[in-house]
Amino acid sequence: MKESDKKEVINLLKTAKGQLDAIIRMTEEDRYCIDISKQILAVQALLKKSNLTVLRQHIHGCVRNALLTGEGEQKIEEIINILDKYIK
């Protein structure tokens, strides 16, 4: 993974972790349910964005190299399996 993308993923995940901690506190404090739900959606968006960056790098790196060396079928199947989970 490119260093800039790695930093972006780490920052997104750390932000999500901080928001999760805040959501736990909000829940413990019996905060308004809609406010909690909005924060959960925000964390999901961060996780989705970080996952997309990881997958993009995997396709541009690992999958591309596997295709160039004639070993792409396994990598293609991995991507299909991930997309199947992602779509559900």
Image: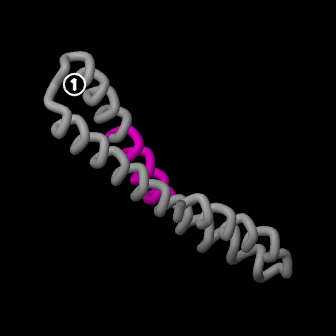
Establish if 57 lies above or below 23. below
In the visual, does 43 lie left or right of 65? left
Q: Position of residue 35 (x, y in %)?
A: 16, 37
Q: Position of residue 8 (x, y in %)?
A: 40, 53
The residue range painted magenta reads 3-15
The answer to which image quadrant residue 58 occupies is bottom right
Three-letter code for the amino acid on which mark 1 is drawn: Met
The residue tagged 1 is 26
Residues 62 and 25: in front is 25
Number of marks present in the image shown: 1
**Magenta span main SS:** helix
Local secondary structure at mark 1: helix
Whether 47 is among the magenta residues is: no
Q: Position of residue 52 (x, y in %)?
A: 47, 62
Establish if 17 lies above or below 77. above
The answer to which image quadrant residue 13 occupies is top left
Residues 68 and 45: in front is 45
Whether 14 is among the magenta residues is: yes
| Residue drawn at x 79%, y 76% as measured from the top left | 72
Count residues near mark 1 (Cα–Cα under 10 Å), then give few for <14, some for 14-19, many for 20+: some
Q: Position of residue 32 (x, y in %)?
A: 14, 30
